[in-house]
Image (cartoon, helix red, strand yellow):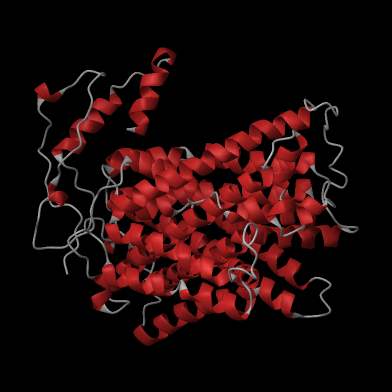
């Protein structure tokens, strides 16, 4: 099935009289994707504001709001800050590299199609299925988190936690069945709520740190110790253990690349979303982790407990005497988990669609209906939500969440490293064919250093993770197997997929630079896109126009 996303060829030159002044408002475009056609394709209905919020919303979730306190308790305030900073550095390299490739080639199944085209078919097969499994398990993980969170208000004796997983899955399924616009609008609202909550927390946290509540400035007296551990090796191991939380927390930042396939005007919207990634990481992650670390000592019950009632984010509100702080924060975390579940349904269905288009999954999974929804792939994805019901019924929702989050964390790391390796080959192949960088819709900054650093960080983190998992472990109990699922299931699965495809189909060979395909599914801009980008380039950048620029950016 032909699933090209756009078939409108732009004119050689935009009309001269099409120039608009900076006060021009663009009406809702009625592009060709809204017209009925025989071919069923993905629809470009995600606007710039959707992508910018998705770039934020894909990251703020239960990892930051629920598990980050455990990372501080394990590694210490400085140790956790280092974990989130190091992983944030890797994320920036991944998102910029993926953005460069997916803005030129806006395909739905980026994690399979892009590595297969510019690295090797074996890597594309393994990376695509690994990424799909990652998101397929993220859905029941987040639904399990929701079930645990709802027990804060409703006793498990009254309503079994697994029932909440089902209740929350139904509206998420409905949103994604509507089409990509339904997903985009829902994710926009949920992400905006999370952003507001984090910003308020940071402001209130600064008040507490500076001692405005009347107990005096805290300074860095709670950095004692800054990194937990009596010996250097133990500190090393504790930091490695905390990295699992950091990777789980950052999972989803790469969604900007996947959504390029359904973005309205990718040349404009994708780079804007990517450019803000660094500042979002710095503010929402590094800022929040820093404040929790300076406000609470590493041995605080608020860091060690799984209960939302003892969440470090709740503690900050209680210090300043905000009534109902626990209820407010619990509601925010429920929203965060729901948003992550919404993103997982979207990413999982589009990845499965891409695998089917490549021939690495049954062809019927590539079918897209008239609304642009890959229905069969979506229904299979929703089926994985049953893991939350079944696992929650037999083992408890909290146990399901801990097991799946461990598996997902390191699989995310490996998927990111595959993208960085692919981007190195993409750029070199692009230039070796005599193509020019200025023709790319988006050029990743700091190439090739950002990719090298990202891969190096990934390798170092793997060493930390392995050391932390085995150091001074004498009893391999159920908790160890639950918290280290990536060792015996996640990474071996990826290696097995790569080797199986390579040996069975002889696909280990790297794609020669001169044979790389930069034309299939290449971005073709409509006349409206070209005109909009020209007007955007003329928008004022001086300080007096900041409000108008803000309104234009969110339009």
Residue placed furthest toward the front: 158
Which residue is drawn at the image coordinates 53% and 52% (left, top)? 336
Horizontal and vertical percent for residue 352? 35, 70
Which residue is drawn at the image coordinates 65% and 54% (left, top)? 66
- Above or below, 470 against 16 in this view is below
Which residue is drawn at the image coordinates 81% and 53% (left, top)? 301
Horizontal and vertical percent for residue 85? 65, 46
Q: In which image quadrant can residue 485 be found?
A: bottom right
Q: In which image quadrant can residue 519 be found?
A: bottom left
Residue placed furthest toward the top: 544
Q: Is residue 426 left or right of residue 94?
A: left
Horizontal and vertical percent for residue 176? 34, 59
Quarter of the image where the N terminus is located: bottom left
Quarter of the image where the C terminus is located: top left
Pick the front one: 185 or 519: 185
Horizontal and vertical percent for residue 99? 39, 48
């Amino acid at each position: 099935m032909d699933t090209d996303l756009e078939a409108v060829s732009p004119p050689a030159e935009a009309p001269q009289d099409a120039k608009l002044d900076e006060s021009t408002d663009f009406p809702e475009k009625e592009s060709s994707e809204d017209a009925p056609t025989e071919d069923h394709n993905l629809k470009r209905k995600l606007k710039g504001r959707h992508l910018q919020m998705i770039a934020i919303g894909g990251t703020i979730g239960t990892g930051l709001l629920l598990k980050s306190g455990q990372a501080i308790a394990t590694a210490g305030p400085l140790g956790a800050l280092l974990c989130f900073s190091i992983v944030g550095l890797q994320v920036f390299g991944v998102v910029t590299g993926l953005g460069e490739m997916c803005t030129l080639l806006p395909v739905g199944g980026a994690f399979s199609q892009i590595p297969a085209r510019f690295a090797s078919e074996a890597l594309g097969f393994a990376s695509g299925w690994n990424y799909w499994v990652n998101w397929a398990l993220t859905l029941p993980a987040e639904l399990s988190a929701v079930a645990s969170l709802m027990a804060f208000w409703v006793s498990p004796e009254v309503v079994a936690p697994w029932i909440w997983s089902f209740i929350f899955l139904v509206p998420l399924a409905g949103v994604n069945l509507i089409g990509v616009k339904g997903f985009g609008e829902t994710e926009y609202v949920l992400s905006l709520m999370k952003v507001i909550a984090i910003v308020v927390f940071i402001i209130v946290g600064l008040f507490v740190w500076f001692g405005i509540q009347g107990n005096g400035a805290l300074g860095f007296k709670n950095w004692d110790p800054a990194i937990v551990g009596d010996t250097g090796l133990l500190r090393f191991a504790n930091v490695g253990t905390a990295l699992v939380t950091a990777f789980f927390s950052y999972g989803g930042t790469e969604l900007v690349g996947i959504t390029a396939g359904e973005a309205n005007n990718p040349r404009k919207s994708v780079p804007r979303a990517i450019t803000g990634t660094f500042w979002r990481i710095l503010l929402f992650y590094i800022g929040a982790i820093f404040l929790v670390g300076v406000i609470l000592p590493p041995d605080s019950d608020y860091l060690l407990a799984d209960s939302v009632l003892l969440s470090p984010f709740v503690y900050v509100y209680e210090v300043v005497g905000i009534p109902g702080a626990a209820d407010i924060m619990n509601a925010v975390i429920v929203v965060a988990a729901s948003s992550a579940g919404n993103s997982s349904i979207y990413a999982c269905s589009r990845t499965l669609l891409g695998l089917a288009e490549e021939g690495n999954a049954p062809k019927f999974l590539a079918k897209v209906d008239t609304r642009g929804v890959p229905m069969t792939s979506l229904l299979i994805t929703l089926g994985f939500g049953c893991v939350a019901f079944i696992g929650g019924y037999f083992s408890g929702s909290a146990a399901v969440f801990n097991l799946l989050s461990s598996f997902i964390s390191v699989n995310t790391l490996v998927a990111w490293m595959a993208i960085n390796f692919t981007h190195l080959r993409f750029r070199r192949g692009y230039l070796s064919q005599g193509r020019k960088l200025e023709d790319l819709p988006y050029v990743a900054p700091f190439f090739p250093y950002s990719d090298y650093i990202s891969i190096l960080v990934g390798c170092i983190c793997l060493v930390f993770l392995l050391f932390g998992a085995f150091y001074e472990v004498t009893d391999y109990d159920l908790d160890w197997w639950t918290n280290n699922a990536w060792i015996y299931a996640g990474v071996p699965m990826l290696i097995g997929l790569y080797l199986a495809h390579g040996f069975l189909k002889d696909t280990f060979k790297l794609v020669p630079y001169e044979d790389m395909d930069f034309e299939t599914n290449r971005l073709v801009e409509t006349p409206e896109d070209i005109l909009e980008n020209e007007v955007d380039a003329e928008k004022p950048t001086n300080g007096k126009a900041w409000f108008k620029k803000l309104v234009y950016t969110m339009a």
